[in-house]
C-alpha cells in the first residue's frame, strides 16, 4: 500500500497595494529628445543604460521622428533571471541591439493614430519596427496592447509623451522580437 501523503494546502493569497505608476511622464520635457528624456527619467534607468551600451542613444537624440515604446525598469525585472544583465555583455550586443530596435517605430505614432489604425485593421494594426519585424497593436478595453513577434504582450501605461523628435509610450513589458 503506498504511503499516505499530506494534503496539499495552497498558500494564502498575496495581497498587495496597487502598483504605483512606474514612470511620471510629466517629468519629461517636450523640448527634449527621446534620448534625453529616457536618460533623465526615473523608472527608465535600465532602458537608458541599455541604449548607451547598444550605442542607440545617438539615434534617439537625432532628428527622427521616432516612436519609442519604452519599457520601465520593472518591465526588465520580469525577464528571466539574469537576462537583463547578460544583454549588457559585449558578446550579446547584437541581441541587445535587435531587442532595443524592436521598441522603436519610425515616425510619430500617437495614441489617436494607433487607435485609428487598429480600428481600420479590424481590431489590429501591424507596425514595422526599426528592426524590420512586425509588432501588433490591439485594444484591451481602452488600453493599447502590443504583441511581439515572439508572442509576449505589453500594455501602454503612459501614452503620448511628446518629444522634440517623436513620442514616447511607456510600456509595462519588454517586447521580444524573433531572435536568430
Image: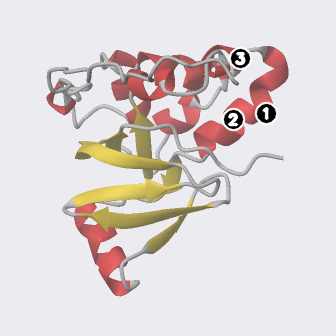
CA gap, disc 3 to disc 1?
Answer: 12 Å
**Side (left or right) of 175 relative to 10:** right
Disc 3 vs disc 1: Cβ atoms closer than 8 Å? no
Residue 112: where, in percent of width, then height? Answer: 23, 67
In three-dimensional space, the C-alpha distance between marks 2 and 3, rounded to whole angstroms, equals 13 Å
Instruction: Out of 145 and 116, give the one closest to the viewer.
Output: 145
For label 3, the SS is: helix
Earlier residue among tags 3 and 1: 3
Q: Position of residue 174 (x, y in %)?
A: 51, 37
Tell me what residue is drawn at x 54 percent, y 49 percent: 152
Q: Pointer 2 and pointer 1: residues touching (CB < 8 Å)?
A: yes
Sort mark 2 into few (<14), some (14-19) or many (20+) by Cα contacts within 10 Å: some
SS state under label 2: helix
Report the residue marked by disc 1: 94
Residue at 56 percent across and 28 percent down: it is 79
User: Where 120 sits versus 108, above or below?
Assistant: below
Question: From the viewer's perspective, is 84 left or right of 154?
Answer: right
Q: In the rendered image, which residue does mark 3 sit on?
A: 86
Q: Residue at x 70, y 24 (%)?
A: 1
Residue 171 percent across, percent down from the top left = 36, 40
Q: For mark 2, what is the residue?
A: 97
Q: Which mark is residue 44?
A: none
Towards the viewer: 53 or 85: 85
Instruction: Tell me how many marks there are.
Output: 3
Q: Secondary structure at mark 1?
A: helix
Q: Quadrant of residue 36?
A: top left
Left-right relation of 17 to 139: left
Name the quadrant containing residue 110: bottom left
Say whether residue 167 is visible.
no
Of the image marks 2 and 3, the number of the one nearer the N terminus:
3
Observer-side mark, 3 or 1, equals 3
Amino acid at each position: 500500500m503506498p504511503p499516505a501523503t499530506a494534503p496539499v494546502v495552497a498558500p494564502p493569497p498575496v495581497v498587495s497595494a496597487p502598483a504605483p505608476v512606474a514612470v511620471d511622464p510629466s517629468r519629461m520635457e517636450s523640448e527634449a529628445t527621446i534620448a534625453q528624456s529616457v536618460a533623465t527619467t526615473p523608472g527608465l534607468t535600465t532602458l537608458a543604460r541599455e541604449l548607451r551600451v547598444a550605442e542607440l542613444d545617438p539615434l534617439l537624440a537625432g532628428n527622427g521622428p521616432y516612436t519609442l515604446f519604452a519599457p520601465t525598469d520593472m518591465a526588465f525585472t520580469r525577464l528571466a533571471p539574469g537576462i537583463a544583465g547578460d544583454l549588457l555583455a559585449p558578446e550579446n550586443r547584437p541581441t541587445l541591439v535587435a531587442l532595443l530596435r524592436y521598441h522603436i517605430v519610425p515616425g510619430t505614432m500617437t495614441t489617436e493614430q494607433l487607435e485609428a489604425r487598429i480600428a481600420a485593421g479590424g481590431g489590429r494594426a501591424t507596425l514595422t519596427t526599426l528592426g524590420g519585424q512586425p509588432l501588433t497593436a490591439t485594444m484591451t478595453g481602452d488600453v493599447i496592447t502590443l504583441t511581439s513577434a515572439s508572442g509576449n504582450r505589453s500594455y501602454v501605461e503612459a501614452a503620448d509623451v511628446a518629444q522634440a523628435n517623436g513620442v514616447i509610450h511607456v510600456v509595462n513589458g519588454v517586447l521580444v522580437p524573433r531572435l536568430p
